[in-house]
């Protein structure tokens, strides 16, 4: 607890990740609601209402935005790095879990369907919003003294989110193994098969596409 209170940089990046992941969750679900006219869950973890790719993007913003002096540079840098994060996350998801959660092949200028010029433009626009509005407010908040309550809440959230990441990755990796007809060999495999069968995972990850046989 004391370590978290003293390490403002770690605290800062954790909350940037959390806020970005939550904002991404809200954005994706509201967007789908408007597009389809009905609610369809978009979520990156089994339990937490978070989409980590947005949180990672927000952390990248925090790393580079304060060093830039002009809105044009902010737009171009966050456009490039945001698109790169989206591409890498899609690639890692496909390699590790045999699925993808988005496919931009319908966009004229796209990069293996993992990101596109259009979506990179969105990342750049979000970077400008972060630069002009979010970063100044967050900077003011984080410059205050770290209270014991904030350190405690942070520790609890870190533990819970870490567990969620671990169980989510394990569950979807085990689903990939089931799709490849690999039987449960360990107690952990049997636990995952019992508590996180396909119907549970598919209910959370409604937009995932299985691409086990794709060539990367």
Image (cartoon, rainbow, N blue to C red):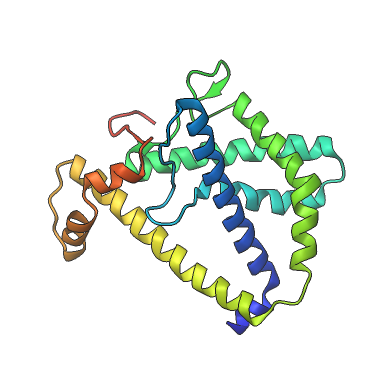
Q: Quadrant of residue 213?
A: top left
Quadrant location of the C terminus in the rendered image:
top left
**Horizontal and vertical percent position of residue 181:** 14, 42
**Horizontal and vertical percent position of residue 117:** 62, 25
In this view, the residue farthest toward the top is 108
Q: Nearer the viewer, residue 47 or 111?
A: 47
Left or right of residue 98: residue 69: right
Residue name at image x 26 percent, y 44 percent: 176
Residue name at image x 69 percent, y 68 percent: 9
**Horizontal and vertical percent position of residue 164:** 40, 60
Left or right of residue 130: residue 184: left
Residue name at image x 46 percent, y 28 percent: 37
Vertical relation: 55 (above or below) 11: above
**Horizontal and vertical percent position of residue 212:** 28, 34
Q: Quadrant of residue 1?
A: bottom right
Q: Is residue 108 visible?
A: yes
Q: Is residue 112 visible?
A: no
Left or right of residue 143: residue 31: left
Q: Quadrant of residue 95?
A: top left
Vertical relation: 99 (above or below) 156: above
In this view, the residue farthest toward the right is 69
Q: Nearer the viewer, residue 186 or 19?
A: 19
């Amino acid at each position: 607890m004391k370590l978290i209170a003293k390490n403002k940089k770690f605290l800062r990046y954790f909350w940037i990740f959390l806020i970005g992941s939550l904002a991404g969750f809200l954005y994706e679900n509201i967007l789908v609601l408007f597009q389809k006219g009905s609610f369809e869950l978009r979520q990156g973890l089994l339990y937490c209402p978070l989409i980590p790719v947005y949180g990672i993007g927000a952390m990248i913003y925090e790393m580079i935005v304060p060093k830039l002096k002009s809105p044009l540079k902010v737009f171009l840098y966050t456009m490039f790095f945001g698109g790169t994060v989206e591409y890498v996350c899609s690639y890692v998801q496909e390699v590790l879990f045999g699925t993808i959660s988005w496919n931009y092949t319908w966009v004229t200028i796209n990069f293996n369907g993992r990101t596109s010029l259009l979506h990179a433009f969105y990342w750049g626009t979000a970077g400008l919003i972060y630069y002009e509005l979010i970063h100044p407010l967050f900077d003011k908040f984080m410059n205050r003294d770290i209270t014991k309550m904030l350190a405690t809440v942070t520790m609890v959230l870190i533990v819970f989110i870490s567990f969620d990441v671990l169980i989510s990755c394990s569950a979807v990796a085990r689903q990939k193994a089931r799709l490849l007809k690999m039987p449960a060999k360990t107690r952990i495999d049997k636990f995952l098969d019992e508590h996180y069968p396909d119907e549970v995972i598919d209910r959370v990850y409604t937009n995932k596409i299985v691409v086990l046989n794709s060539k990367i």
